[in-house]
Image (spheres, rainbow, N blue to C red):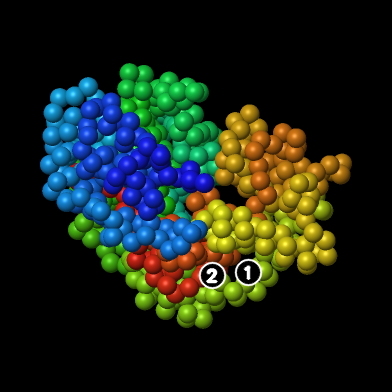
Amino acid sequence: MIEARVAQRGKGVLREFNEAGVLEAADVHVALRLATLGGETREPVHLATALAVRAVRLGSVCLDLNRIREVHVDERPDGPAVDPATLPWPDDSAVTEALQSSPLVVGGDKGPLRPLRLVDNQLYLDRYYRQEQTVRRILDARATGHPAVDEGLLLAGLDELFRDHQDPSRPSAAPDRQRIAAAVAAAHWTSVIAGGPGTGKTHTVARVLALLERQHPGLRIGLAAPTGKAAARLEESVNEQVGVVGLQSQLSAMTLHRMLGWQRGTSRFRYNETNHLPYDVIVVDETSMVSLTMMCRLLEAVRPEARLILVGDPDQLASVDAGAVLADLVARPAAGAENPMLAKVVGADLSATDDPAEAALSAAERDRLRKGMIRLSRGRRFGGQIAQLAIAVRDSDPDRVLDILRSGAPDVSFVDIEDVAGVRADVVSTSTEVTAAALAGDAVGALRASEKHRLLCAHRDGPFGASWWARNAMDWIGEAAGSRLDPDRWYAGQPLLVTANDHETRIYNGDTGVVVSGGDGELIAAFARGKEPYLLRLGHLALVQTVYAMTIHRSQGSQYHRVSVILPDAGSSLLTRELLYTAITRARTHVRIVGTEDAVREGVERQVSRASGLRRG
């Protein structure tokens, strides 16, 4: 029986790369279809086209021909992974020369179809090249000037909204990066507020909006995020501070798709380059999860005279679709003219730091202020060795990471995959507490208890996957309770994960909740929504699943007191620096890494490499 992953039409070099696991059948089919339509017969072009399709499938915007041989192949069920170096790679210069004259490439020989574009030795599917150019063009145009700001009003607002932590009656003493971020957002058409978990990004956003309302009474504000879960969290975080900062009213947040008016069944949106969004300021949270395509559509729809504030952590996992836009924007060279107003209102902060453990704003950071980018660096959600571990991972220092993991510190631990006693104890104790609260009808207590521990995995399936470990967790809980859990029926204490947006019931993909007993004995679902839980009859739930373990991707935007991270073998292509960093920063009080030293080193040293031309400037 021939495997479905092998494209039967593939011959020659495409067949060999397909059978080795470098190319999927879909990559081969698309390349051959384009070659047939364009009249291209040369194998080097076929291979480069298939690799460009593969690159987009894996998250890159283009194929970097300078690194064409840098491919990773996971182990296969029938044996070890094929070494890519043993494959029949064509000569690099032959690939480039063939592409330069190919009828498939814009600028090559004339042909009926030109779906590819070759720029600076990067091969694009033309659609993504045009999107990247649109993003570049609009951002550069927005950076050529600055919005008018009443400096006196801004300075008074900064003094009022950013107070000394020791003496709230006084303005904060310099330095304060949150204060800088607020001034930057007020003074630029486009701004980026970057920072890790707990650095106060949404705390700062609420104050930015209050400052802008004072500058422009009646300001129309739009809040958005790439997922329903992230949008709900943004709305809660901002609205919790409405009274504190003096915002004029409660605000609603929505997904980017909903804000842009996605037209079901198409790739089109109601709001676009000819019909702009009706907002004076737009805030986008969790921007690291925004793909190139979505960023292109957003920028087209934003009015040139509207402020756009992009918020997120560039060190976290990027979008599941092509592009790593936030990381590209942070790394992109500074553009635009310096705004002298910044020095007037936050001059003292620019030459100092808000954390004694750090140096003052570096020359590079001060240069980035010209493009409206500021990174918040002082973590307020967790500290100690969790913070140091996250920094060591971010800085790609595997020796330091292992030293911290083996330090015996109370907030970090490192155990072998066979040593699951601690994981089991955390799973069982958390479930016991959740179930007790759920049976008592205490939705708040059940939701609070559900955040005490979370089991995170890199994979969905297999011995290191969320499905495998969820079954283990159910077995452990059943043994401790003296009765097996039945995954096919509802029960009090059952942890839930929403897998699809449902705007009518106000639950969103990625939301987590708990089944609890209602007042009349009926079971209901409870989801966290600010101070009061959101309760919903089970019959009204859309797509949900029981979640005793979840993927690290799914955990983005969430926080738990204790986290156990199951690492796959070192050969897994999912094992990256961004994955480890994201997993570690989900924990508030303790992170447990379950795996091998080789897996840790591999994860710390391998960075997600998404080819893109956006960061070239």
Asked if marks 2 and 1 touch (Cβ < 8 Å), the reply is yes
Where disc 2 sits, the SS reads strand
* Residue depicted at 42% across the width and 44% down the height: 6
* Residue depicted at 67% across the width and 58% down the height: 471
Q: Name the residue under label 2.
A: 594
Q: Which of 99 and 8 is in front in this view?
A: 8
**Are there few (<14), some (14-19), or many (20+) residues within 10 Å of tag 1?**
many
Q: How far apart are marks 2 and 1 (CA)?
A: 9 Å
Where disc 1 sits, the SS reads helix
Residue sitting at the far top:
274
Residue sitting at the far front:
1
Q: Which of marks 2 and 1 is nearer the N terminus?
A: 1
Q: Name the residue under label 1.
A: 423
Left or right, residue 176 beside residue 94: right
Q: In which quarter of the image is the C terminus?
A: top left
Res 466 quadrant in image? bottom right
Q: Which of 201 and 523 is in front in this view?
A: 523
Q: Which of 355 and 518 is in front in this view?
A: 518
Visible residue check, residue 355: no
* Residue depicted at 28% across the width and 67% down the height: 359
Left or right, residue 194 beside residue 486: left
Left or right, residue 397 beside residue 363: right
Tag on residue 148? none
Instruction: Name the residue type under label 2.
Output: Val
**Residue 264, horizontal then vertical, whole percent:** 50, 23
Left or right, residue 100 beside residue 199: left
**Residue 354, horizontal then vertical, whole percent:** 35, 62
**Residue 136, horizontal then vertical, whole percent:** 24, 36
Count of numbered marks = 2
Visible residue check, residue 395: yes
**Are there few (<14), some (14-19), or many (20+) residues within 10 Å of tag 2?**
many
Instruction: Name the residue type under label 1.
Output: Val
